[in-house]
Image (tube, rainbow, N blue to C red):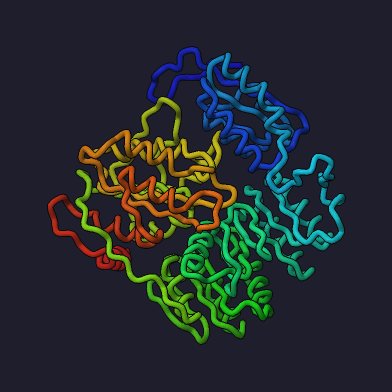
Amino acid sequence: MEPTPPATDGHPAPDTFTSNSVRCDAYADSVALMRAAQHLTGLPGITAASLVMATEPNLRLLDDAQLLTDEGRAARPADLIVALRGTADAIEHALAEVPALLEQPAASESSEPDAWVPRALGEADPATALALISTPGPYAAAEALKALRGGMHAFVFSDNVPVDQEIRIKEEAHRLGLLAMGPDCGTAVLDGVPVGFANALRPGRVGLIGASGTGLQQVSCLLDAAGEGVRQMIGTGGRDLSAEVGARTTLDALDLLAADPGCELIVLVSKPPAPDVAERVVERAGRAGKPVVAAFLGTERPRTVGSVTVVGTLRDAAREALRTLGGAPAPSWTPPTVPPGPGRYLRALYAGGTFAYEARQLRPDAATEADPYVPDHAIDLPERHLVLDLGDDAYTAGRPHPMIDPTVRAAHLRAALTDPHTAAVVLDVVLGHGAGPDPAEALAAELEDVGDRRRPPVIAFVVGTEGDPQNVDAVRARLEKAGAVMAPTSTDAAEWAVSLLTQPGQPHRKAGELAAQGRAGR
């Protein structure tokens, strides 16, 4: 146990210590580790907690978060580090809880006390069709290849997998006629079974393929709200449409859905793809024999190529899908007229990385980095527009993802609400399996704590369905009660926020006009 160094503002941390407890050759699933870290962070006297495997990238992240001690530095990649910051008594109490937290069965495991659970791919039932891989990145490729060669599709949740290994995994999957979803794949719904961070979606006739997890969630939830259901939702990993990877999983998934008679429409979702890869995907989609909607974020001019319609936003993807299926999309949303805050800058604080990408198309001049959260240290926001993906490693070092634990985002929200340079704030709240049980409460509490005194407008949107474990209507109502103004989609929220970025007292301008101006000015 070592004394905690002073925060970056020079303030000491009296009676606070940093501890690393190393559990040798002890592996646990990353989602289980995040949930354990969330529990420990909530204990009295604990200001930060992280449970990670001692891989080189994780050691760097702990060091950046001032959570690494000499004991942790000496750990091997197969070891588990329990890193804690807090008072000595609180750390002792927290460490005593760790064994029980790690022994809790995963939600997907049988609740029967005598049920046998395989602990290695070789122990799995030969009929097993899918392997979910969440090992440290350096080991993920080997496990994915084992799964594929065992006849299983591979869902690779792990990140920090080298791109050459990703290509090797996907080439092997293609050779074997299987799917390699990931690395860094966060969501899927396969034959009605949610995998990773996924919403409870009604079954239906739409097949979705996406190189963006929260983008898939947004589009699928909008379809669900309009009464349409999902046949399959296949995540590919965020790099799939890069020039290096070349859409290997996207193309295989397109062929799979094209051959499925129960799939009547295919929707593709991706962060800005490599241009030549995008054209290759559109050409293949045109041979699917059924209509395809491709949402390539950043596309400035929607276009139709045969049976393929290419759009540039998540909202337009859902609208075009519903139009193609003969349904009635939600009517256009007219935002209320509200005055901007005292400043001139946007503060968009997202838990979903895709939403940050979408907002950056409207404000390409926005900063994409801010101070990481350090307990008892005031966050200094830049004097320019700010669009953050707070699920990025830079902000989750030593902490769970903001979809599970809102601590980091609540701190940035507090800084944005009290910053005199803020004109508008945007927040997303993502529900579903894997997300926290009450993801809006901490954000609502920050809004109520600041109060209404010349507070900048806070624009929020919720990604969820009526079937999700959280109550989607209650979440929206809680945010509205705290003073947030609710937008129906991520696209509407970003466009409306941009429309408020005028000098106080100037006429309110329509979101579409400013959005078009922002794109034309790039």
Q: Is residue 267 left or right of residue 254?
A: left
Residue 73 spot, x, y in % from top left: 65, 27
Q: Looking at the image, how many numbered discs can be counted on the residues?
A: 0
At x 53%, y 16%, the residue is 87
Snapshot quadrant of residue 497: bottom left
Q: Nearer the viewer, residue 427 or 513?
A: 427
The answer to whether one can see residue 272 in this image is no
Where residue 452 appears, as percent x and y from the top left, is: 24, 39
Could you say where residue 211 lies in the image, as x and y percent from the top left? 56, 62
User: Relative to residue 9, is residue 336 depicted above or below?
Assistant: below
Q: Is residue 111 above or below residue 124?
A: above
Q: Residue 356, image x and y in percent? A: 43, 54
Residue toward you, 410 or 74: 410
Tell me what residue is drawn at x 52 percent, y 65 percent: 220
Q: Is residue 165 above or below residue 382?
A: below
At x 34%, y 48%, the residue is 480
Quadrant of the snapshot with the N terminus:
top right
| Residue 383 visible (yes or no) | yes
Determine the residue positioned at 47% across, 56% down: 463
